[in-house]
Image: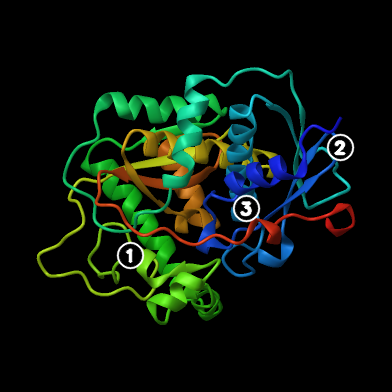
């Protein structure tokens, strides 16, 4: 008897696709075998300028893998994960095989229920501090996936990291090819046109137009100007996520940690957004590593807080990300 029938496979893949990815490219594919599920990178959706080495695509696939694990767990059919099980297949990110059937844990149930509600919130957050207990939960979530999450404490640490984000942002913005690539993933037009999109970042979900004096520079997705009386929070909770190394498998693992942290934040009622610019510029990434005193490279800068709900980005139909045995290359 097969591990999952087709209907169950479609259901767990639908949950997997609710993961974050740079510019909402959704660079993942899924393949069902008799006793395995394969997660693959979609090379056609890798960003040539923003992600030439594929780090962001692997992190995104790792996040999708975490969702897949949770969806299997709540069905009582958990999976055993092997990262990059076949080194001859550069697109194969992970393979899951059946584990002993068992009931899900309360944590798995809570995180799974948070999957539909998790999405980037690029709007201003409230000037309301995140409690110490919640901060501890975020750190523990990263540790649960063999990763680390450093919360930046104090104005000096926040300003230093924000300065590195600004430096990386300026480097990227000077690249005409990068700006052109970004524009291809912005979904503008009428509200109906944006609603019909299946990938990319709709203007409505991209946040307000960036201001030159913001502490953390944001990508410009064509949003409207903020009213003069609205400002971004004065003391944002900024965190840096990383793992034990920087090999492809480490990046996939960091993606799982990123998603567990983000789902934990969502379950706690927190909003979050990502700043990957310092990860995209190698020299700035190294400066960030040295500033943190970490031996392994950071994989993401995150911002947490309380906020009014914001629109989510769209998702591709599940049928678009499922491949057969002969379609994996």
The residue that disc 3 covers is 55
The scheme the figure's colours follow is rainbow
Real-space Cα separation, disc 2 to disc 1, in angstroms: 43 Å
Q: Which mark is residue 34?
A: 2
- In this view, 274 is above or below 98: below
Residue in front for this viewpoint, 151 or 181? 181
Q: What element carries label 1?
A: loop
Q: Is mark 3 on a helix, strand or loop?
A: helix
Q: Which part of the image, by quadrant, shows the C terminus?
A: bottom right
Location of residue 270 in the rendering, given as x and y in whole percent from the top left corner: 31, 40
Residue in front for this viewpoint, 94 or 55? 94
Residue in front for this viewpoint, 299 or 122? 122
Please indicate, yes or no, whether residue 297 appears anywhere in the rendered image.
Answer: yes
Mark 2 vs 3: CB contact within 8 A: no
Residue in front for this viewpoint, 54 or 20? 20
Nearest to N terminus: mark 3 or mark 1: 3
Residue 21 location, quadrant: bottom right
Mark 2 vs 1: CB contact within 8 A: no
Mark 1 burial class by Cα count in 10 Å: few <14, some 14-19, many 20+: many
Q: In this view, does 225 lie to the left or right of 275?
A: left
- In this view, 306 is above or below 153: below
Identify the residue at image location x=60%, y=62%.
Answer: 316
Identify the residue at image location x=38%, y=26%.
Answer: 137
Q: Which part of the image, by quadrant, shows the N terminus?
A: top right
Q: What element carries label 2?
A: loop
Location of residue 212 in the rendering, given as x and y in whole percent from the top left corner: 26, 70
């Amino acid at each position: 008897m097969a591990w999952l029938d087709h209907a169950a496979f479609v259901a767990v893949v639908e949950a997997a696709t609710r993961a974050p990815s740079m510019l909402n490219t959704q660079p993942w594919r899924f393949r069902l075998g008799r006793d395995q599920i394969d997660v693959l990178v979609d090379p056609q959706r890798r960003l040539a300028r923003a992600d030439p080495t594929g780090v962001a695509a692997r992190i995104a696939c790792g996040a999708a893998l975490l969702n897949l694990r949770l969806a299997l767990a709540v069905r009582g059919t958990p999976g055993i994960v092997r990262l990059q099980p076949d080194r001859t297949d550069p697109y194969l990110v992970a393979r899951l095989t059946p584990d002993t059937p068992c009931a899900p844990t309360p944590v798995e149930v809570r995180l799974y229920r948070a999957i539909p509600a998790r999405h980037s919130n690029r709007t201003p957050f409230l000037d309301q501090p995140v409690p110490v207990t919640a901060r501890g939960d975020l750190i523990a979530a990263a540790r649960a996936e063999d990763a680390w999450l450093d919360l930046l404490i104090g104005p000096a640490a926040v300003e230093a990291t924000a300065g590195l984000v600004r430096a990386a942002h300026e480097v990227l913005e000077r690249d005409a090819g990068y700006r052109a690539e970004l524009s291809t993933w912005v979904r503008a037009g009428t509200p109906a046109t944006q609603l019909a999109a299946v990938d990319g970042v709709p203007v409505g979900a991209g946040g307000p137009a960036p201001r030159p004096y913001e502490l953390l520079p944001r990508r410009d997705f064509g949003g409207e100007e903020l009213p003069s009386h609205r400002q971004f929070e004065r003391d944002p909770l900024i965190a840096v996520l990383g793992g034990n190394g920087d090999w492809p498998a480490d990046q996939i693992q960091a993606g799982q940690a990123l998603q567990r942290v983000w789902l934990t934040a969502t379950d706690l009622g927190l909003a979050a957004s990502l700043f990957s610019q310092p990860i995209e510029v190698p020299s700035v990434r190294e400066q960030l590593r040295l500033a943190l005193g970490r031996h392994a490279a950071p994989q993401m800068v995150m911002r947490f807080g309380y906020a009014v709900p914001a629109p989510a980005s769209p998702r591709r139909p599940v049928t678009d990300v499922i491949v057969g045995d002969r379609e994996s290359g």
